[in-house]
Amino acid sequence: MMQLSYKFSLITVFVAVVFIGCATIGDPTPHGTLISLEQIKSLKSDQSWNGKRVSIEGYASFCKKGFAAPSRITMGKKNLVIIYSAPDCDGEALMQANLLFAGNRTKLSGEKERNFISVDDNFDNKTMKFTTDDYQELANSKFKFSGKLIWDDENYYLEDVSIHQ
């Protein structure tokens, strides 16, 4: 009888640890108001959007040199990425977005991570993987980036960004 009780206790502890240690799925992040290219161009003169949650559609891209060079990325931290109207730094530069760059890691407890970019050591625009707000892992394509619009006395950028397909 004692041995059966001991086995039952071990199983109960194991099940409790497994369920307590599992990462949970969070509620969807609200989208911001979708702003057009014309509205983006007028942001410097129209401060009414400052501090509001907005969305822009575009492609997160790194150009080969300068501010948005891949060599300037710090893994495990947020980095400013330029959102373009077309893939691979083509089209118009719409806005910067402060996005988390995460390595390959698995969260065992708390809310499961989302809204980040996964890259390897020698990444480029074609090899970036995006984990969206609904936990899909997708190749770099056109996304809707939603975040709080911040003015830094020179430019606007998005903070607290969620990524939507």
Image (spheres, rainbow, N blue to C red):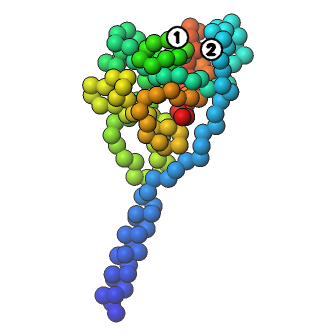
Q: Which quarter of the figure is the N terminus placed in?
A: bottom left
Residue 31: horizontal and vertical position, in percent? 64, 33
Q: What element carries label 1?
A: loop
Left or right, residue 66 beside residue 49: left
Residue found at the far right of this picture: 48
Which picture quadrant has residue 152? top right
Q: Is mark 2 on a helix, strand or loop?
A: helix
Q: Nearer the viewer, residue 40 or 85?
A: 85
Q: Nearer the viewer, residue 16 or 82?
A: 82
Where is 16 relative to 48, above or below? below
Where is 72 relative to 100, above or below? above
- Label placed on residue 92: 1
Left or right, residue 130 beside residue 34: left
Residue 98: horizontal and vertical position, in percent? 49, 24
Residue visible at 41% across and 75% down in the picture: 12
Which residue type carries mark 2?
Leu
Left or right, residue 89 beside residue 45: left
Q: Is disc 2 in contact with disc 1, using a CB cutoff of under 8 Å?
A: yes
The answer to whether residue 106 of the structure is visible from this angle is yes
Which picture quadrant has residue 117? top left
The residue at which mark 2 appears reads as 37
Residue 21: horizontal and vertical position, in percent? 42, 58
